[in-house]
Every structure is written in C-alpha cells, then in structure tokens.
Image (tube, rainbow, N blue to C red):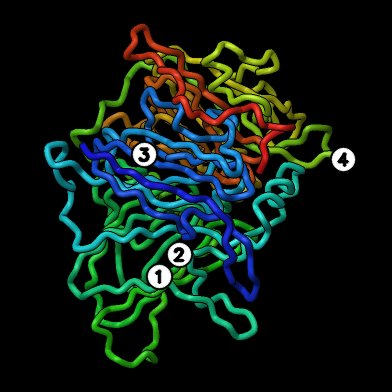
Amino acid sequence: AALVEHTFVVSQIKLNHLCNETLVTVVNGQLPGPAIEVTEGDSVVVHVINKSPHGVTIHWHGVKQLLNCWADGPVMVTQCPIQPNNNFTYRFDVVGQEGTLWWHAHVGCLRATVHGALIIRPRPGGSGSYPFPKPDKEIPIIIGEWWEISPVELEKGIAKGDFTDLPRSATINGKLGDLNNCSGVIEDNYILDVVRGKTYLLRMVNAALHSEYYFKIAGHTFTVVSADANYVKPYTTDTIVVAPGETVDAMFVADAPPGRYYMVLVNSKTIEGPVQTRGVVNYIPSKGSDDTPILAPEITGQDDATTSFYFHGNLTSLPHSLMRPVPRNVDEQLLVAIDTGYTCEEGDPTCGPVSRMNNISFQLPTTTSLLQAHYYHNMSSSIREFPGRIPPGTVFNKGRTLKATSVRRVRYNTTVEIVFQGPPDGIVYSNPMHLHGHDFFVLAQGLGKYDATKDVQTYNLVDPPVRNTALVPISGWTAIRFVANNPGVWFLHCHFEKHVSSGMGMVLIVENGPTLETTLPPPPTDFPSCDDQSGGVAY
Ligand code: C2O
C-alpha cells in the first residue's frame, strides 16, 4: 500500500460567470478541486492550509474512517474549524472500498465550491481488478451549482428559515453550459472528446447543495456499475439519477454515428432553480465543421419522480470479495420522521420554518465538538437523547419543534435499522440521508406511510445495494440496516444544504468495544483547537 500525499490550499479567487465577477472559496485555485486518486489499501495524507477568511473543515464523504473519527471532518461534530491562517493534516486509510467517493468542506455552505473527487481503484493482490470490462478511459463528472450569493449569506438566510435563495445554474465540472448567457456572452460548455468504439467510465459525483439531478447523453445508454463506491449488478439505463451526496459510476460505449451530442443535467422535482445545464460529447476526429447540429436528448420532465424512484430501487449489489452478508437480527430499530416544522405555533409570523428529525431541529454545539466532548467525558447537560420513534400524533409539516443537539448512543456492534419516513404529501423532493462512518444496506423503499407488518415483506435481504446515502422518495420511506462497528461520533443528516443547515440531522455515538482494537484512539496532536471560537463558528 502506498502513501498518497496532497496539500490543499484553501483560498478565495474571483470567477466570472453570468457577467458577474464573484469571489469564491476553492482548493488550490481550482473548481472543482483536485481529485485524489488512490488504490484500495492506501494511506492518504492531506495537509490543509487555510488561506481563506472562513473557518474550514474537510469531510471525506463515504470514507469509513474505521477507528479514525478524528479525521471525519464535520464542523462541531468531530472538530472545531481550522481557523484562517491555520493548518491541519488529515490522515486516513482507504480500506475495503473501491469506486468513486468525494471530499467537501463541512462548514456551513462552503462545500458549494470546496469539493472534489476521491477515486479508489482496485489493488492488485486485493480484489485485483474491476468486476466489469476495463474502460478505455475514466472521466470524473462533478455536478455542482453556481450560486451568486456568498455561502455566508446563504447560511444566514437558511438559519433564519428563509429558503428562497437559489443557485443560478447547475454546473458540469465547473462549467455552466451554453444555455446560460448574459448580454450575448454564452458560458463555456464542458466538452468530452470520445473516440468511436471506445468505452468510458464516468465517475459521477453530485456535489450540489440544492438539487437531485437527472443526467442523459443524446443517443447513448449507460451501464451503471457502482454507486457510493460499492459495486452494483450491471444496470442499463438511458438516465442516471444522482442526489446530493451520492456518487454513480457508469460506463458508456461511444457507439453512435460520429458527431456531437449534448449531455444534459435536469434537476428533478424542484419547484424553482436551474432547469437544464448542457455539456457536449464530441466524437474525434471531428468532421471539421463546427456548424453540424448538436443532438439533444429527450428530456425527462422535471416532475418525473418515478424515474428517481426506480433508478434507486433497481440497483442491487454485486457479490464481491469486499461485501459482507446482510445482518438478519436487528438490535435496535429507529423510526425517523423527516420533515419541516415551526418553532412556534403555526401562523405566528415571528418564526420561520426549520427542518427536523423526529420533531427535533438539530443544533450544532458552539464551544467544543461533540467528539471531543464525548472522548473527554465532558458532554454538556443540554444535549438531548434522540428519540427512537416518531413522536405520537406527529403531524407532518406542522406542530412545534424542539431545537436541540440530539444524540443517540449505541453499543459497539449493535445492528441498527433505520426507517426514514418522509412527509405524506406536499413535499416535492426526495431526501438524501447520509450517514458518516458506515456504509449501510438499503433494504427497501416505498411510497406512502411505512407499515411494519406489510413492508418488511418487501425487504431485500439477498442483494440490497450498499451505500452511504439513502434517498427517501417523495412522500415515502426508505429502510436501511448496518452494524455500528465504528466507535466514534457520526453525523446523520440530509445532504440538501437547506435541510441540514436548518436542522435535519442527528448524531449517532457508537461506544467503544471491549478491546483496545475496538477503542477509539486519542486525537492527533495537531488537532484544531476549540479555544479561539469567540462566540461560535467563524465562517
Ligand atoms: Cu457529504 Cu456530512 O456529508
């Protein structure tokens, strides 16, 4: 196994889009940031040098961080921010995972522009090779969004219950595409050059804050081979669906007549926001003239939630050496209602909406991280136990909400099942629920209200997909299961920024096991101090 070392300099640069110069925070002057490429089993060292005016942390989304919670990164959950002009070195191993993951800032809305891919290839002597034909080329496709509002202002708005700010456009590898223009200036397309007959592996990451996206290339179909760095049985589709936080690896063969084809992102089922963003698949050598029309795909309607439901429901895991069997006995089942509510009586104009889980709107601590408090037996008495059941009589989207830092403790090696229940109707998007520190099996999803006696019959206990983000369908539910075998403090939250920033989250504390090998070691010596927090997190 090798040591892969990177230096991430976080700083602000000016980018010009839509006729405006905007100050954005990026890593190493790039948007998207640098891709980290490793072989399974490698150790990764990333020196983060913060030259931005914000407090910064980086999360390695999907990396299990076994016994290494200190490197996980969510601000005030595992660590205090790296303050401006300070440094911190993240050290972690990438073991037992292959495929595409990613990294992003985990402070406020900073991840809008502080993100990049983390690519894990099979290790010779480990699993050895891809369980699918070797592609001729691998291409990261990072889906992002262009916001003109600063992340600080955006975060402030959300915290006040103002959800009205919207991205100006979706982006493909940082490009806004030719449907965006102002004063006659057309934005850049992302162009993917292909050679006829060759096979391409797209490593797709949805790094966007706001939307789930559908992705199509005119005249081509995909074979999905992996999701969230877990192999799936080859699944053929003309539309890929990626929700925020999710990754999908998909192959396509350049088997169409030579020409130019649009690749299109459509945001699914949101009322407002960007509608379409395009890039181009260009066959080379090209015919010479640039005025041959570019073929556009037929577009799935924005209101088409069915495509997302079936895309997610049709994935099954590929039996593989890295895979574990589905645990049969559940030690602890949580029923978790995810919705939006109010902190005062409905109709009171003085309080805006908050997001919540089981009627608690999650608040980050302000003085020390939960992990440090837990490790040093210093938990504040104001911390609440997260209830394992939907409060009786819960009326979705209504009723008073408690604001609290809510945690749930589980013993080492507990098998946990969580059923996420979305609101019955009126909510127009699916919710991508992301768990840190563990992958889980997605056993089933359904529409309407979860019915324990009936719905357990639909559980896939044979080959359920393994993921780190579970999409809870519009007006429906999703059931996940995992063994809590990673001692530490792990954030569980919706990956829509407006939801997590307004409280749709909770923290799972996995206790140490009985031996030294199952006990969380002490923090690294250069761990960011919580002393200079002067009145909360400095964004
Ligand atoms: Cu990708 Cu807690 O997030």
Amino acid type indicated by mark 3: Val
Q: Residue at x 33, y 93 (%)?
A: 289
How would you rate the neighbour count of disc 3 (Cα within 10 Å): few for under 14, some for 14-19, many for 20 or more?
Answer: some
Q: Secondary structure at mark 2?
A: strand
Q: Is mark 1 within 8 Å of ligand 1?
A: no
Labelled disc at residue 263: 1
Residue 235 in sight: yes
Labelled disc at residue 236: none
Labelled disc at residue 172: 2
In terms of depth relative to the viewer, which is nearer, 126 or 43? Answer: 43
Amino acid type indicated by mark 1: Met
Report the Cα–Cα distance between label 3 and label 2: 28 Å
Q: Where is residue 481, by image quadrant?
A: top left
- Label 4: which residue? 350
Q: Residue at x 68, y 28 (%)?
A: 366
Q: Residue at x 37, y 45 (%)?
A: 101
CB atoms of marks 3 and 2 within 8 Å: no
